Image (spheres, rainbow, N blue to C red):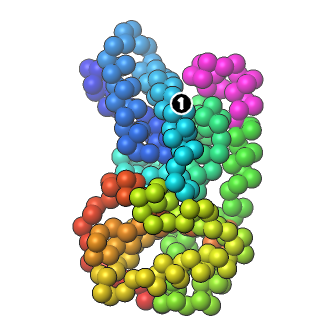
Amino acid sequence: MNSLDVFEAQRSHLLGIAYRMLGEMGAAEDVAQEAWLRWQRADGIRDPKAFLSAVTVRLSLDALRKARARRETYVGPWLPEPLMPDDMRALATDAPAARAELASDLSLALLHVLERLSPEERAALILHDAFDCDYDVIAQTLEKNEAACRKLVSRARERVKADRPRHTVTTQHHRELVSKFVAAAATNNLDQLTSLLAHDVVLYSDGGGKAAAALNPIYGADHVLRFATGVMRKFGPADGFTLEPTEINGAPGFLLRTTEGLHSALTMEFDGDKISAIYLLRNPDKLSRINPRPSPLSSPSA
């Protein structure tokens, strides 16, 4: 195999590392491109995957540290850039089982939690839990000793475990619950909305200062209920309002479109049958990869 073929065989793997590290597909592609340039300059590499993985992690660490500084002044909550089904396929192997596993560790909820880790904790956890790397490999990549890497992974795992919902639901049940919520919001069915929300639900709305959104997370069922019904009340048939079911980062979600184009992307996290978190992406920069053409689907009915 020539050098390009060797690199292309690893591209999905490298993008998977970089996206998990950065939460932005565009930035992940930039990292992969820089890894390619370094690969071209390298000689005598015995293990291309190990070399390229290490380069990608180090480049991602540098990029994440710079991104952290920018995100400190970000307007409102910062959410990861959503992945559409085509993006997910670009990060997956051909095996359906691998795609299912990939979806489980690319959720917006998990990526949002990963933002609370230090860059080194994030890298160590991703390498160990998402890519099954041994501690000696992680130590080499992060240029730390194995004991330090074990502590990084342990600390990161505890923080993620503490912030993730205790229960999960099947994909089909997840889809049904998301559809119920959207239908209830569209028809202003307050009773059904209330029944679906956990009392401590939180809603994150990311506009980045470029689209109308809540400037702080919204906590509690009552406040989330008022926000959700207020958003839906603004739209009607005259706005060309449609709700398009899709998958966002491998989980059921919706795209909200109006006559002006794509308005937002919506997905949720569940604790049992209750919605524990809602992620509403409005920043047009993060929605730019989504097909802008209007969907023929109409809003769901109750």
Residue 100 visible in the picture:
no
Which percent across, then down, holds residue 125?
Answer: 63, 37
Q: Quadrant of residue 215?
A: bottom right
For the point 41% across and 39% down, the residue is: 27
User: In the image, which residues are magenta?
Assistant: 134-153
Image quadrant containing the N terminus: top left
Residue type, label 1: Leu
Vertical side of 220 occupied by 238: above or below? below
For the point 37% across and 86% down, the residue is: 236
Residue furthest out toward the top: 44
Magenta span dominant secondary structure: helix
Residue situated in front as seen by the camera: 121 or 235: 235
Mark 1 Cα shell of 10 Å, populated few (<14), some (14-19), many (≥20)? many
Please name the residue that numbered disc 1 is placed on: 61
**Secondary structure beneath label 1:** helix
Residue 4 visible in the picture:
yes
- Is 58 included in the stretch rendered in magenta? no
Horizontal relation, residue 293 to residue 201: left or right: left
Residue situated in front as seen by the camera: 145 or 169: 145
Vertical side of 138 occupied by 95: above or below? below
Residue situated in front as seen by the camera: 70 or 259: 70
